C-alpha cells in the first residue's frame, strides 16, 4: 500500500501531464479525422492558456470556469480561422497553420498586457488530478458520441475520399468547419490545462515542443479512432519518466526511437480499427477453410491466381 | 419499354446543352448536346479517351463546364457544388471502384444514405430518440440495398477484403442510398465476367422499372445492345450520333471510330 502511495506521489504529476497532452492530441485528431493536417491546435492552446491564466490570476475565477472560458475562446478563434483555412488545399493549409504558430509566438511576445510578454505569466493555482480526469472524461464522451453519429460517418468518408463523399451529398466544407470548431474548443481546454499544471506559461510553452508532443502522440496512438490520441499521449508522456528510472542514459533519444519504430511497424498507430477488422476477417477465413476444406470454387473469377494456387495446394 | 415509348415522352430528365470543357489547350468535351430520357437506360459510349468520364464529372459538378449549360429536372446545375447536385437526386459509381477504406460494406452503404438521414448532425450527436430511430431505419434501408445486390451476408466485412465484382455491387448499393432520380454508372461491368455483367444489367433494368433513370458508360457492346434503350456515341469529346442503341451501333461512323481502333472488340 505504501509502495502504491509512493508511486502515486512520484507519478501523479505525470498522469496529469498525460491528460493535458491528451486534449492537445485530441484537438489535432479532431481535424485530422476530417482529412486536415493542421498545427492550429497550438494556436488555440495558446489562446486558451492565456485566457485561463488571465481569468485565474487576473480575475480570480475558479479553475473550472477558466477552463470553460478557454474552451470558448478556442472555439471562437477556430470559427474565425476555419473559413480562411478551408480555402486552401491540404498541404498549403498545413504550411499556413505552421506559419500561424510562428506568428502566434511573436504576438504573444509583443502583447505583454495580455500575456506577460517575454516574462510569461505565473498561474497561482494547480489543478487536481480528479478535476482534470473529469474534463478528459467529458471530452472523451463528446468524441465517443461524434464517432457513433452521422458526423463520424461523414468525417470518415471525407477523410478517405472527399470527392466521393461530396457525390453522396456530404458537404466537405461543412464537415471540416465543424472539425475545426471542435479542434478549437478542445485545443483551448488543452492550453488551459497546460497553464494550470505547469503554473507558468510563456510564448515558448505553446511552440515547437508542444507541437512535437501533439504530433507524436497522435501518430503513436493512431489517428483513426478517438481513443488513439489518448493512448498515444499517455505513452508519450510516461515514456521519458519510465526511461529515466530504467536506463537514464538513453532517455533523450527514447522519444525519437519509439516514434520511429511505431511509424515503421505501425504506421496507422496503436489503436487501429481497420487492422482489427482485417485480423478478424483473416481469422474467419481461416476457420471457414478449416471447416469446409476443400474450398468450393468461388465467384472470385477476378482473382484467377488465387484459385489456381488453391487448386494446386 | 420500347424505343418509341420513350420518344413520346416529354422533357428529358437530364440535358447537356452545347457543353464545352477545356483543360488548358485540350478540349475534352466539344460542344456536346445530350439528353437523357426520363425512365430509360441511356448508354454513353465511345473509344478510350473520348471524354465519357469527363461528361460524368461535368454532370456531378466535379468540373464546371467552360461553356454551355447543364439541366436536371428543370434546374440549371452547372456551377453547383457536387454535394448540392447530389442533393437534387444525382448519384454515381466510379470506373475504378472508389469505396472508403476501413469501412464495412454496411457502413459504405449507410454513408450513401447520408442525404436520407432525416435528422441533423447535432440531433444525431446528442443521440436523441428521433435520431436513433432514423439511424435504425437507415441501417435497415442499407441492409435492404445490400440484399438487392446480393451482398447482405457480407454486410460486416471490410470492403477492401471483398473481390472486385463484390466491391462494384457495394458501390452500386451505396449510390442508391440517396434514392437518386438519375444514376450514373461508369463502366459498371468492367472487370466482371459475362454472368456477373448480366446480373448487373438485370439489376439496372429492375431499378429502371422502379422509375430510376440510368446513364451507363459502357465498353461492353453486348451490354449496350442488351440493356440500353437509347445511347449517345462520342469521340474526341464530340457527338457522333444519338438515338436508339441498335441504330447507333450500326452507324458506319461509329463502326469506324470504335472497331477501327479496337481490333479485338
Image (cartoon, rainbow, N blue to C red):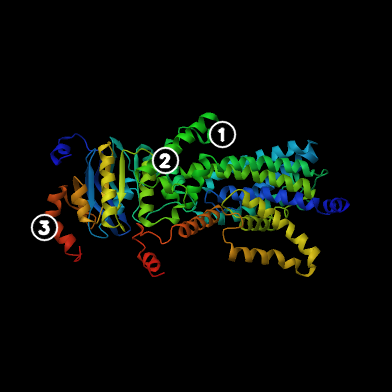
Mark 1: which secondary structure?
Answer: loop
Q: Earlier in the sequence, mark 2 or mark 1?
A: 1
Mark 1, Cα crowd under 10 Å, few <14 / some 14-19 / many 20+, is some
Mark 3, Cα crowd under 10 Å, few <14 / some 14-19 / many 20+, is few
Residue with the mark numbered 3: B252
Q: Earlier in the sequence, mark 3 or mark 2?
A: 2
Residue sitting farthest toward the top: B130
- Are the residues under marks 3 and 2 on the same chain? yes
Q: Nearer the viewer, mark 1 or mark 3?
A: 1
Image: B25 above or below A147: below
Q: Which residue corresponds to the image point at 64% horizontal and 40% vertical from the top-left?
A: A141
Viewer-nearest residue: A55 or B48: B48
Label 1, label 3: how far apart the Cα atoms are = 62 Å
Mark 2, Cα crowd under 10 Å, few <14 / some 14-19 / many 20+, is many
Tell me residue B86's x, y (percent).
37, 41
Residue with the mark numbered 2: B142
Q: Earlier in the sequence, mark 1 or mark 3?
A: 1
Residue with the mark numbered 1: B127
Mark 3: which secondary structure?
Answer: helix
Viewer-nearest residue: B118 or A274: A274
Say which chain tag 1 marks. B
Query: In the figure, residue B76 lies in which quadrant?
Result: top left
Query: In the figure, residue A168 lies in which quadrant?
Result: top left
Amino acid at each position: 500500500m505504501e509502495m502504491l502511495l509512493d508511486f502515486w506521489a512520484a507519478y501523479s504529476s505525470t498522469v496529469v501531464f498525460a491528460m493535458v497532452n491528451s486534449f492537445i492530441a485530441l484537438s489535432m485528431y479532431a481535424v485530422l479525422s476530417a482529412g486536415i493536417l493542421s498545427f492550429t491546435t497550438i494556436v488555440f492552446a495558446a489562446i486558451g492558456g492565456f485566457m485561463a491564466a488571465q481569468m485565474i490570476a487576473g480575475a480570480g475565477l475558479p479553475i473550472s470556469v477558466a477552463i470553460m472560458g478557454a474552451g470558448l475562446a478556442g472555439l471562437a478563434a477556430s470559427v474565425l480561422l476555419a473559413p480562411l483555412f478551408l480555402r486552401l488545399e491540404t498541404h498549403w493549409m498545413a504550411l499556413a497553420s505552421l506559419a500561424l504558430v510562428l506568428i502566434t509566438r511573436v504576438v504573444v511576445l509583443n502583447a505583454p498586457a495580455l500575456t506577460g510578454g517575454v516574462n510569461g505569466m505565473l498561474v497561482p493555482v494547480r489543478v487536481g488530478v480528479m478535476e482534470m480526469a473529469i474534463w478528459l472524461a467529458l471530452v472523451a464522451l463528446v468524441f465517443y458520441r461524434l464517432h457513433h453519429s452521422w458526423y463520424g460517418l461523414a468525417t470518415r468518408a471525407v477523410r478517405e475520399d472527399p470527392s466521393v463523399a461530396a457525390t453522396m451529398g456530404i458537404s466537405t466544407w461543412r464537415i471540416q468547419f465543424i472539425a475545426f470548431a471542435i479542434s478549437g474548443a478542445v485545443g483551448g481546454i488543452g492550453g488551459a490545462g497546460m497553464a494550470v499544471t505547469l503554473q507558468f506559461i510563456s510564448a515558448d510553452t505553446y511552440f515547437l515542443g508542444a507541437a512535437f508532443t501533439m504530433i507524436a502522440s497522435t501518430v503513436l496512438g493512431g489517428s483513426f479512432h478517438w481513443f488513439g490520441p489518448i493512448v498515444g499521449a499517455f505513452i508519450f508522456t510516461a515514456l521519458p519518466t519510465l526511461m529515466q528510472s530504467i536506463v537514464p542514459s538513453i532517455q533523450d533519444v527514447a522519444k525519437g526511437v519509439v516514434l520511429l519504430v511505431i511509424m515503421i511497424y505501425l504506421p496507422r498507430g496503436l489503436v487501429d480499427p481497420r487492422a482489427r477488422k482485417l485480423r478478424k476477417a483473416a481469422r474467419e477465413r481461416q476457420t471457414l477453410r478449416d471447416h469446409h476444406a476443400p474450398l468450393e470454387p468461388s465467384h472470385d473469377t477476378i482473382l484467377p491466381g488465387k484459385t489456381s494456387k488453391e487448386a494446386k495446394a | 419499354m420500347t424505343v418509341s415509348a420513350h420518344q413520346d415522352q416529354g422533357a428529358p430528365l437530364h440535358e447537356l446543352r452545347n457543353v464545352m470543357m477545356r483543360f488548358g489547350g485540350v478540349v475534352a468535351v466539344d460542344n456536346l448536346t445530350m439528353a437523357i430520357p426520363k425512365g430509360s437506360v441511356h448508354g454513353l459510349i465511345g473509344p478510350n479517351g473520348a471524354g465519357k468520364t469527363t461528361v460524368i464529372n461535368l454532370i456531378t459538378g466535379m468540373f464546371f463546364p467552360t461553356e454551355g449549360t447543364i439541366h436536371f429536372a428543370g434546374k440549371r446545375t452547372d456551377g453547383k457544388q457536387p454535394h448540392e447536385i447530389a442533393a437534387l437526386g444525382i448519384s454515381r459509381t466510379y470506373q475504378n471502384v472508389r469505396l472508403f477504406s476501413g469501412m464495412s460494406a454496411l457502413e459504405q452503404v449507410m454513408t450513401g444514405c447520408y442525404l436520407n438521414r432525416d435528422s441533423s448532425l447535432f440531433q444525431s450527436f446528442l443521440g436523441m430518440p428521433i435520431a436513433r430511430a432514423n439511424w435504425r431505419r437507415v441501417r435497415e434501408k442499407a441492409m435492404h440495398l445490400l440484399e438487392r445486390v446480393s451482398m447482405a451476408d457480407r454486410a460486416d466485412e471490410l470492403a477492401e477484403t471483398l473481390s472486385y465484382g463484390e466491391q462494384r455491387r457495394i458501390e452500386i448499393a451505396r449510390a442508391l442510398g440517396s434514392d437518386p432520380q438519375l444514376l450514373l454508372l461508369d463502366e459498371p461491368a468492367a472487370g466482371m465476367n459475362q454472368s456477373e455483367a448480366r446480373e448487373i444489367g438485370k439489376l439496372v433494368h429492375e431499378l429502371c422499372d422502379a422509375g430510376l433513370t440510368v446513364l451507363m458508360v459502357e465498353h461492353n457492346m453486348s451490354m449496350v445492345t442488351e440493356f440500353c434503350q437509347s445511347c449517345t456515341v462520342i469521340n474526341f469529346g464530340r457527338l457522333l450520333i444519338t438515338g436508339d442503341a441498335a441504330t447507333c451501333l450500326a452507324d458506319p461512323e461509329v463502326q469506324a471510330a470504335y472497331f477501327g481502333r479496337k481490333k479485338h472488340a
